[in-house]
Image (cartoon, rainbow, N blue to C red):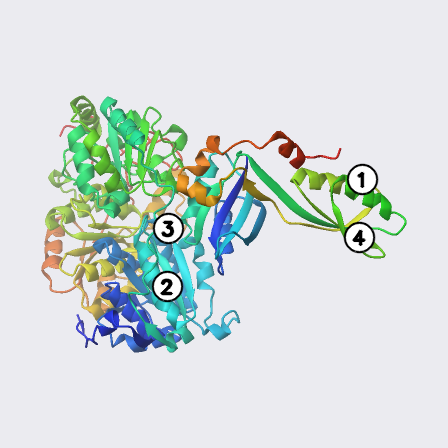
Amino acid sequence: MTHTFIAYVEDMPGVLTRVASLFRRLNINIHSLTVGHSERPGLSRITIVCEASAEAGHRIRASLYKLENVVDVDDIAQAPSVTRELALIKVAATPKNRSQIFELAEVFRARIVDLAPESLMIEMTGVESKIEGLIQVLNEGEDRILEICRSGKMTMRRGHHTSRVLRAMGAAAEDNAESGTEPPENLEAGAAVEPQ
Amino acid sequence: MASRTKPHTSDAHLTTPTRLTGAEIIWATLVGEGVTDVFGYPGGAILPAYDALRKFPIHHTLVRHEQGAAHMADGYARASGKVGVAIATSGPGATNLITGIATAMLDSIPIVCITGNVSSKILGTDAFQEVDITGITLPVTKHNFLVNRAEDIAPALRHAFQIARSGRPGPVLVDITKDAQQASAIFDFAAAKPRPYRPHPMLKVEPSGLAHAAELIRDAKRPVILAGHGVMESGAMEQVRTLAERAQIPVALTLLGLGSFPASHPLNLGMMGMHGEAWVNHAIQEADLLIACGMRFDDRVTGSTSTYALKAKKIHIEVDPAEINKNIKVDVALVGDLRAVLEDLLPLVATRDGSAWLKTIDASKGAVAVRDIKNLPDSGHLYAAHVMHDLWRITGGDAIVATDVGQHQMWEAQYFHHEQPRTLITSGGLGTMGFALPAAIGAKTACPDKEVWVIAGDGGFQMTAAELSTIVQEGLNINIAIINNGYLGMVRQWQEFFYERNYEATPLVSPDFVKLADAHGICGRAVHSRAELADAVAEARSHNGPFLLNFMVEKEDAVYPMIPAGSALHEMIRRPGKSPIVESADDKL
């Protein structure tokens, strides 16, 4: 199954290697990895997506906690959460076929962020499937994709469950049942808009 | 013991912040952490530290190879329960430590290794003797530090000690650049204190879990306690014993658990696993409840996991959450310090009658019992089992024994009966040949008043034999027993059983070990028959100084029983019928 781990780590040299090395040692391939500052000073937030057996989740989380620089770990698993990915896509486009791509971008709620005589750049945020949808449509059309840059998944639990609350609650990740109120339906729908 | 007392500098720097060089801060911090002995080897990048050593009340043992330094720190830690310290220079000095660090990692031994590195200005330039030792040791340390400022040395070292000894212990490496050692900083021992220790957030001992465990114990008909190294690390010997006695539960031990429960105790079954006696493994396979205390269901104790103790419910009491359900799925996990968990559990456990189950185990012992080998007629051959048995008998089982890895290690585990914790020092997880001699030096340094024996094979002994000089230089009274069969015995045994006796690369030519000892100024004696054994051991023990005994044992003896790797625990290769050491089922006692 797909696991999504959120790790708060000390923002210092070598910490990413320690985290990545753990997955290497367990022979688990990391699908995506994003790192950035968090709401807590001095701590970075890492989102790691990987494929591993359901039972492996516990051991990975426990092993992450054994790393001295790891402060908090959450295994999102199947808990209600919001996941987003950012993609920049550069497409070969001339003045002749630009408008067609503009339309496409609008349908996907993507933005054109750069325009050059022979190319344009699309910025898009969304769930993985939505980004893949756009890429597929671009590939199927006559437009030529020149470059793709994807950020990897970022995930946050729905509701109030910030890592601090989770820590206070102790049991946290094992207990997805009590992960807060379900989002209003329209919000959910809005988040999952698929153009096709 | 040359120059054990050194000029003390005032201890004022431990209480009053003082400006010191980085090199001085290293030693001052070690003194503050209670370190009295270190094992090391100097070199360019660590020279500033060595230059400052004379000012501090720390004894330095010069090793002959840095692997020895790490093993000595390890043996020191295993024998004393304190943190062992090894020191090496950059580059090859640091890489030579790695086998010793990995040995400590696999067996959860608290050691701190300090390495010098090239100056921070040239880090990453492939400078002379530069190596990325924090990168290299990342998977075999609990944590490591790269320090390139004098003011960071004390906090890093203090943090290293905290990490090494807390939770599930393990090795920590602190790599200190040469310019950090040469620079100066205000040394404030108290201010360098690490942040409070954070227990693993997934430790979990719930009242419901304790109640469930107590219920399982109450209702079990055929329970077995599995006692591992964690019993010693947690200091839970009394608690395990109370549990066993109160509920009348037999205790099986892992290799590293030997000594944590007295061998002579009527409830002690002995060592479990690959070379455990048949009744121990049968008891585990037949059990309806296993209470695993500070052990990790290593593949050497489970055999095939798909056939392991299928009839048993399992309670796992363990300090490392990552070990829960890793190899064997358990019914109740009590994740915490073993001693604390047992103290919470014991009030819930009532006395129990275990006689029927104990009788069943006793009956299974009868069929395969190891004959009391001291009563065996002397057939003229010398068997390693005899050596172990007689060493045990003559030393009264009180000695600290450091073993190497291989057949002799398993024979020692079978025939030398350990009553006390920290009396068997052996590399279990990594199985490091060459471990015994340096580990014994560490143990003797930690416990100078204890009798210390090295038991090593002719193969493993040669891997670190250079440390004989260290024994002499340090004036250590260590006795050495070489179990010499002219083969890499355990590998030969595998070739015999599983590779059609194709003895490829296992016959071994060795020097005359007695002459080798003599060249070092160590007395020695070869022993060819059992008749000479007791006298030789007595001579070694009464000799003032180290002594080497070269036991010329039966060449193609094998360790029985044996569970082939990956087989079920009950599918063992038993002793051949007419073994001169052990009776078969139809022999009369």
Cβ–Cβ under 8 Å for marks 1 and 3: no
Which residue is depicted at the point 57% across and 33% down?
A: A183
Within the image, what quadrant is residue B25 found in? bottom left
Whether residue B222 appears in this view of the structure is: yes
Q: Position of residue A48 (x, y in %)?
A: 54, 45
Q: Chain of mark 1?
A: A
Q: Indicate the amino acid at tag 1.
A: Glu
Separation (CA) of disc 4 from disc 2: 51 Å
The chain carrying label 2 is B
Q: Is residue A7 above or below residue A80?
A: below
**Viewer-nearest of discs 4 and 2:** 4
Q: Look at discs 1 and 3 and give the one toward the viewer.
A: 1
Q: Nearer the viewer, residue B268 or B492?
A: B268
Q: CA distance from mark 1 to mark 3?
A: 64 Å
Quadrant in which residue B90 is drawn:
bottom left
Q: Which disc, if any, is residue B297? A: none
Q: Quadrant of the N terminus of chain B?
A: bottom left
Circle 1 residue: A140
Have a look at marks 4 and 2 and say if they share a chain.
no
Where residue B112 appears, as percent x and y from the top left, is: 33, 60
- Compared with B457, B210 (above or below) is above
Residue pointed to by mark 3: B506
Front-lying residue, B23 or B514: B23
Type of residue at label 2?
A: Ala
Q: What element does badge 2 sit on?
A: helix
Earlier sequence position, callout 1 versus callout 4: 4
Residue under label 4: A120
Image coordinates for residue B465, horizontal then vertical, percent: 29, 62
Residue mark closest to the camera, 1 vs 4:
4
**Which residue is painted at 34% across and 62% down in the image?**
B113
Which residue appears at 47% of the width and 64% of the height? Answer: B132
| Numbered circle sitting on residue B156 | 2
